[in-house]
Structure formats: structure tokens, C-alpha cells
Amino acid sequence: MSETKFSDTLGAALMCRLSDLARDAGQSVEDCLREAVAEYVASREDFALSLARLDEAREERVFLRVVGE
């Protein structure tokens, strides 16, 4: 299967599933997609913040280790 056909098939399957979810939720496809994208963006932002906190903590530990030597 070519990459284009795979992409088209995947896109059609996702739209079909999205349509089912929207119907089950009593929403329009656009509203369902908007909600899904907002949740995805929020989760990515949470992940990025978590990584930033871990990085800051690592830098602080390294600094304290260097200062303590």
C-alpha cells in the first residue's frame, strides 16, 4: 500500500470513528474534534511543564553538587 493510500485510509477510518463518537455524544463532528484537539493540546502542555520541572530539578541538583565540592 502506498503512503498516500495508507494516509487516506487512516484519515477515513479516523473520520468514521470521530463521526461515531460525535453521534454517541450528541455533538457535531466539529465540536467533537475541537474538544479532542483541546484535550490533546492540554496534555502536551502538561507534559512540557513536567519536563521543564524535571530539568530544573536536575540543574539544581547538579549546581548543589558542584557548589558542595
Image (spheres, grey):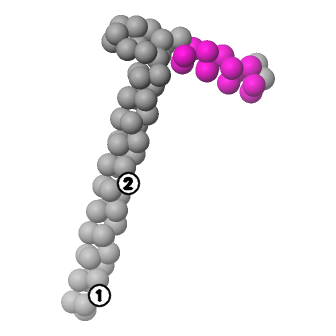
Image point (26%, 69%), residue name: 57
Say which amino acid is labelled 1.
Answer: Val
Classified by dominant secondary structure, the portion drawn in magenta counts as helix
**Residue 55 place in picture, x, y as percent:** 34, 66
x, y (%) of residue 56?
30, 70
Residue type beneath disc 2: Ala
The secondary structure type at the circle numbered 2 is helix
The residue positioned 39% from the left and 45% from the top of the image is 44
Per the rendered image, the range of residues in magenta is: 3-15
What numbered label is drawn on residue 66? 1
Q: In this view, does 34 lie to the left or right of 57?
A: right
49 over 56 or under it: above or below: above
Query: Pointers 2 and 1 in contact (CB under 8 A)?
Result: no
Q: Earlier along the polypeptide chain: callout 2 or callout 1? A: 2
State which mark lies toward you, 2 or 1: 2
Q: In this view, does 18 lie to the left or right of 64?
A: right
Query: At numbered mark 1, what does the secondary structure look like: helix, strand or loop?
Result: helix
> Which sits in the foreground, 48 or 60?
48
Figure check: 37 above or below 61? above
Residue 48: assigned label: 2
